[in-house]
Image (cartoon, grey):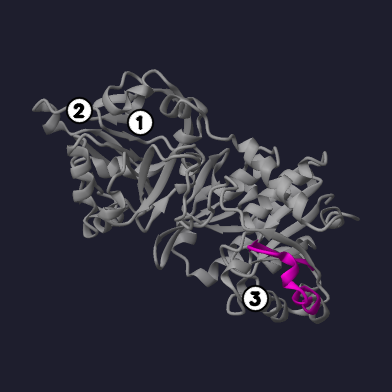
Amino acid sequence: MTARCVMVLGTTSGAGKSWLTTALCRHYVRQGLKVAPFKAQNMSNNARVVDGGEIGSAQYFQALAAQAEPEVRMNPLLLKPEADTRSQVVLMGQVNEALSNMPWRGRSLHVWPQIAAALDALREENDVVVIEGAGSPAEINLHASDIVNMRVALHAQARCLLVTDIDRGGAFAHLYGTWALLPAEERALIHGFVLNKFRGDASLLAPAPQMLQELTGVPTVAVLPMWWQHGLPEEDGVFDDRTRAAGAVNKTIAVIAYPRISNLDEFQPLKNVPGVRLVWARTPADCAGADWIVLPGSKATAADLAWLRTQGLDRAIAAHAAQGGAVLGVCGGLQMLGEALIDTHGIDGNAPGLGLLPLVTQFDLQKTVRHTHTAFGALHGAWSALSGVAAAGYEIHHGQTAQHPAMAAGGDVAREVLPGGLGWQNAAGNVLGVYLHGLFEDLRVMHALFGATAPTLETVFDGLADFIEKHVEPGVLDQLISP
């Protein structure tokens, strides 16, 4: 095994592990090294299609930052929450029903050999593997069954950075407490502390970093300033309710943030467009004044549709559409816009739809997971700018959607605007539903809709690397991969 392994651990979820791992991937590849990301287990409904199945979106972006082809070995285990106590288990890119039905604590014995093999294979093929942990490595109730934090670090003998969110308060206690709860052999792998999301004068932190080093022997190697608009999607959920458009706001887009929202990362490019304000809508009031209302993907379409109705959002969406407002449904959102969800296999659930498109969705046992290259046909009304535009994206869905037979016989027919049932528009032209995820990551689509493109992912990755190269203590990034 030739690769040096660098691991990013966090004192909590949301501390900054994912974006720091992405930044390190781009930094090391800029040094002329062959780099791959790795996360043993990711729990997220943000997933991307790769050769062999699906992986967490964070590892997908990290692979792109590393200029590597994203693949299933980079995230061998993906847990996609379907309810508070149940997740769909994806092992090496494929849904595994046996593991999905297995008690949580019993899984580690079964999955560790494949996790270790995936990591070992990446180490054999690369100069550097940048590993991301999950949550906190000091969850002592989970330590015996750990397969994502210190067990991985020990297996790879990784040099670890421990990052904390100082904006939350208690950062030094978080760092010390995490370090103190680790066994000695695991403490020895911590090579640096990172204070993330700092506001103000860093000199005012003294003497805390020095005192912390005296207690632990671990230096604080970086103080990273608060940076709201780095351009990388949030990894775990809708954390960013402070979306700010550059310049005067000329378009407000409300994305319905139901409990099992999935693939929300695909809306990050909208947040980067000057003049666009993105709102995560949980109540009808959040939709007031919106130019677009977007129904995103869902890991539990019927349940999220029920939640939407409980919140009164169904009436808000219907009123917006009745007034000619633009509505977009993506994947599960498309399914919700139709007349009915039919589930004869117990996959998601039966439910009446919102009735904004004369369509019906039937859930199939087989899951569609693929990349798709296509082109829009003729559209009219609010979405006419997309007419004839080529687009690339990805599909992850169980449902298959088609015209409602009885409604079509009565003359109420949806316009098929993407071939193969991938996109539909209502007669008035203001409601559009598509199965294709990732439309806003396609510069052709962005140019058609906004007349200008958002910053590219390459720009974002280079910006992340520039940021850490400026704020990490000199020589530290080299020392992490030195012999």
Query: What's the CA distance linking mark 1 and mark 3?
Result: 47 Å
Disc number lying in front (1 or 3) = 3
- Label 3 sits on a secondary structure element that is helix
Observer-nearest residue: 2 or 56? 56
Query: What's the CA distance linking mark 2 and mark 1?
Result: 19 Å
Q: Amino acid at mark 1?
A: Leu
- Label 1 sits on a secondary structure element that is loop
Question: Which image quarter: residue 18?
Answer: bottom right
Dot 2 or dot 1: first in sequence order is 1
Q: Residue at image x 72%, y 81%? A: 180
Image location of residue 448, percent across then percent down:
43, 24
Query: What's the CA distance linking mark 3 and mark 2?
Result: 55 Å
Residue linked to disc 1: 422
Image location of residue 193, percent across then percent down:
74, 67
Segment tinted magenta in the rendering: 190-212
Q: Is residue 418 above or below residue 349?
A: above
Image location of residue 319, percent across then percent down:
18, 44
Q: Which mark is residue 174?
A: 3
Q: Residue at image x 41%, y 64%? A: 86
Is label 3 in contact with label 2 (beta carbons under 8 Å)? no
365 with respect to 264 (left or right) = left
Q: Amino acid at mark 3?
A: His
Residue 36 visible here: no
Residue linked to disc 2: 428
Q: Amino acid at mark 2?
A: Ala
User: Mark 2: few, some, or many residues within 10 Å (few <14, many ≥20)?
Assistant: few
Q: Is residue 198 magenta?
A: yes
